[in-house]
Image (spheres, grey):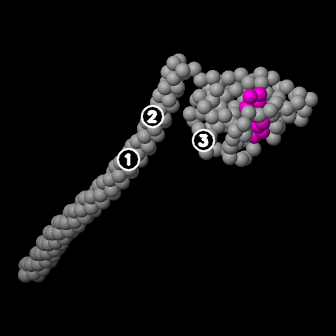
């Protein structure tokens, strides 16, 4: 009985030992697995960090390249704007120079006209001119019969010369033509003391009659005077 009981105890102890050994073995395996998992997790973490660092580096390089490209584009735009401003300034300067030159030419022409008028005025104070140095007609005209014409009136008369422009009827000005707003174009008139004329032009200033003459000097010498005018029927 004692041996059987001892055998049973020994068998039971062996079972306990096996159970303990299995438990220890399972615990060891679990520990190894945990350690392996921990190592793998650490490796994965390092890999992820490495990839993140690469992505950050690539992103930084991309941003640097993008900023450089944008900087080049901005510099090109600024250079273009500067060139356009310089061209516009040059254009404005040329226009201003042309306007100044034109203004100087006009002032010079006005001064020349003023000088001529002053010279004429000085001559007229010392030697009054009663008649033009050149008569408009070669011979003194004979006054036509009163029955063949109508008295238009004593008109304030001036003289003008060619400026390169056509008269109101489209023709170039010539001796024998006058400007008058009181009668229709094409009307034949007689100016007492000067002869026959044809109204070909219109007046843009205050006189009532403007007689065409060949030269500027003749116009200045004629000045302004009152003449008797008749409309020839």
Residue 21 percent across, percent down from the top left: 12, 75
Of the two numbered discs 1 and 2 in the rendering, the one whose residue sits closer to the viewer? 2
Front one among 7 and 145: 145
State the separation of the CA atoms marked 1 and 3.
35 Å
Residue 96 percent across, percent down from the top left: 42, 40
Asked whether the beta carbons under mark 3 and mark 2 sit within 8 Å of each other, the answer is: no
State the separation of the CA atoms marked 1 and 2.
27 Å
- Magenta region's main secondary structure? strand
**The magenta stretch spans residue 101:** no
Inspect this view and state whether residue 36 appears.
Answer: yes
Of the two numbered discs 1 and 3 in the rendering, the one whose residue sits closer to the viewer? 3
In the displayed structure, would residue 159 be above or below residue 20?
A: above
Under tag 1, what secondary structure? helix
In the displayed structure, would residue 110 be above or below residue 84?
A: above
- Mark 2 crowd level (few <14, some 14–19, many ≥20, 10 Å Cα): few
Earlier residue among tags 1 and 3: 1
State the separation of the CA atoms marked 3 and 2.
17 Å
- Region rendered in magenta: 190-204
Please name the residue shown 82% across and 30% down the image: 143
Q: Quadrant of residue 219?
A: top right
In this rendering, the count of numbered labels is 3
Residue 135 is left or right of residue 76, and the answer is right
Q: Residue furthest top?
A: 125
Report the residue marked by disc 3.
Answer: 163
Report the residue marked by disc 2.
Answer: 108
Under tag 3, what secondary structure? loop
Residue 100 is left or right of residue 9, and the answer is right
């Amino acid at each position: 009985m004692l041996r059987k009981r001892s055998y049973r105890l020994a068998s039971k102890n062996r079972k306990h030992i096996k159970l303990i050994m299995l438990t220890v073995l399972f615990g060891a395996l679990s520990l190894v697995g945990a350690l392996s998992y921990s190592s793998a997790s650490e490796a994965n973490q390092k890999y992820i960090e490495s990839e993140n660092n690469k992505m950050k580096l690539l992103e930084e390089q991309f941003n640097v390249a993008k900023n450089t490209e944008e900087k080049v584009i901005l510099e090109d735009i600024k250079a273009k704007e500067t060139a356009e401003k310089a061209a516009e300034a040059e254009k404005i300067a040329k226009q201003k120079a042309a306007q100044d030159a034109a203004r100087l030419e006009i002032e010079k022409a006005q001064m020349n006209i003023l000088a001529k008028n002053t010279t004429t005025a000085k001559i007229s104070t010392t030697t009054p001119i009663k008649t033009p140095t050149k008569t408009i007609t070669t011979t003194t005209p004979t006054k036509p019969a009163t029955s063949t014409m109508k008295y238009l009136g004593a008109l304030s008369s001036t003289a003008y010369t060619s400026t390169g422009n056509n008269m109101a009827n489209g023709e170039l000005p010539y001796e024998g033509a006058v400007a008058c707003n009181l009668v229709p174009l094409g009307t034949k008139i007689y100016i007492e003391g000067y002869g026959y004329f044809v109204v070909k032009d219109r007046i843009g200033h205050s006189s009532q009659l403007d007689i065409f003459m060949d030269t500027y000097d003749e116009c200045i010498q004629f000045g302004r005077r009152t003449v008797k005018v008749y409309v020839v029927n």
